């Protein structure tokens, strides 16, 4: 493993001008973290001037529309504690409680979480940054999100007992889940191109806010062994089609929380 990691760092530094804009020390830390975790989501933020072009290129395939809310306080108590609570209504509704950042070391993750098959750890990598997250997801019934965010059911009905325990552990008894606000909605359109079309393996997400401002992101997932090849191929595809990427920018979650707490 040591030799493989050493080779990956060396190759990664050579590929950095093409796929990454991180300093060498950050690249080394990113490769080491990816090697430890094993699963990666590569994310490329699309600059506004390329929104129309990337829609034309990738908006052909399986589509899904969801309505996204984050749960937090007005001063972002959960976010400051390293927790995101997100619910998605519409097609295939679900709830997710995410620890971010998380130390992937087994001793740093509660044993009860490590034993769960539905607890996933993944590294999000952009050209400028990387962060490790641990997520616990629950599928929901149709209209469950809409009923809860509009006050017809308590917000806690959107989460499993394990998710609630994770949230409550960060609220320290001062608040409960039902005291949180539903910050949203954001309309999220997701498209995955067909296997025979351009951009197969990529996913396009467009986040549309109430004032019609937008975030657009192209992403793909891979294992640690395929990181270099997948990143190079995705970057080459975007460059070949003249898709301009945004510079360093906050995550979709942070952008959304900031948007709604400024209102």
Image: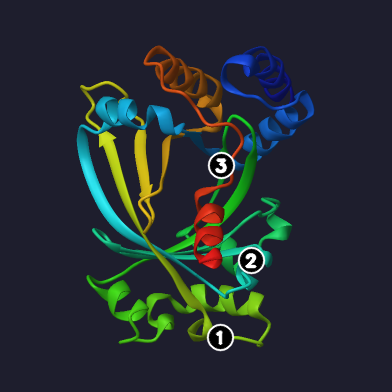
Q: Are marks 1 and 2 in contact (CB under 8 Å)?
A: no
Question: Residues under labels 3 and 1: Cα distance?
Answer: 29 Å
Mark 3 and mark 1 residues within 8 Å of each other at the beta carbon: no
Quadrant where the N terminus lies?
top right
Of 226 and 125, nearer the camera is 125
Among numbered discs 1 and 2, the one appearing first in the sequence = 2
Left-right relation of 106 to 145:
right
Residue 123 at x, y = what percent?
58, 42
Tell me what residue is drawn at x 61 percent, y 42 percent.
37
Label 2 belongs to which residue? 111
Q: Earlier in the sequence, mark 3 or mark 2?
A: 2
Element under disc 1: loop
Going from the N terminus, do you reach mark 3 or mark 1 first?
A: 3
Residue at which label 1 appears = 176
Residue found 63% across the figure and 32% down from its top: 128
Q: How is the image coloured?
A: rainbow
Where does label 3 land, which residue? 124
């Amino acid at each position: 493993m040591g030799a493989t990691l050493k080779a990956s760092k060396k190759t990664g530094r050579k590929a950095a001008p093409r796929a990454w804009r991180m300093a060498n020390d950050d690249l080394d830390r990113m490769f080491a973290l990816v090697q430890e975790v094993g699963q990666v989501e590569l994310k490329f933020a699309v600059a506004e001037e390329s929104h129309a072009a990337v829609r034309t290129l990738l908006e052909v395939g399986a589509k899904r529309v969801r309505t996204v809310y984050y749960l937090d306080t007005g001063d972002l108590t959960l976010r400051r504690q390293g927790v995101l609570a997100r619910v998605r209504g519409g097609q295939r509704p679900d709830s997710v409680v995410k620890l971010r950042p998380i130390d992937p070391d087994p001793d740093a993750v509660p044993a009860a979480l490590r034993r769960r098959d539905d607890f996933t750890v993944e590294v999000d990598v952009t050209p400028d940054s990387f962060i490790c997250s641990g997520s616990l997801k629950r599928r929901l019934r149709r209209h469950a999100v809409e009923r809860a965010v509009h006050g017809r059911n308590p917000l806690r009905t959107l989460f499993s007992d394990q998710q609630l325990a994770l949230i409550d552990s960060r609220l320290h008894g001062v608040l409960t889940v039902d005291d949180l606000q539903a910050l949203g909605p954001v309309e999220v359109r997701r498209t995955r191109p067909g296997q025979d079309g351009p951009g197969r393996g990529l996913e396009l997400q467009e986040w549309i806010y109430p004032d019609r401002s937008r975030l657009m992101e192209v992403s793909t997932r891979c294992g640690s062994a395929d990181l270099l090849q997948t990143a190079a191929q995705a970057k080459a595809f975007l460059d070949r089609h003249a898709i301009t990427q945004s510079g360093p920018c906050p995550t979709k979650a942070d952008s959304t929380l900031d948007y709604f707490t400024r209102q």
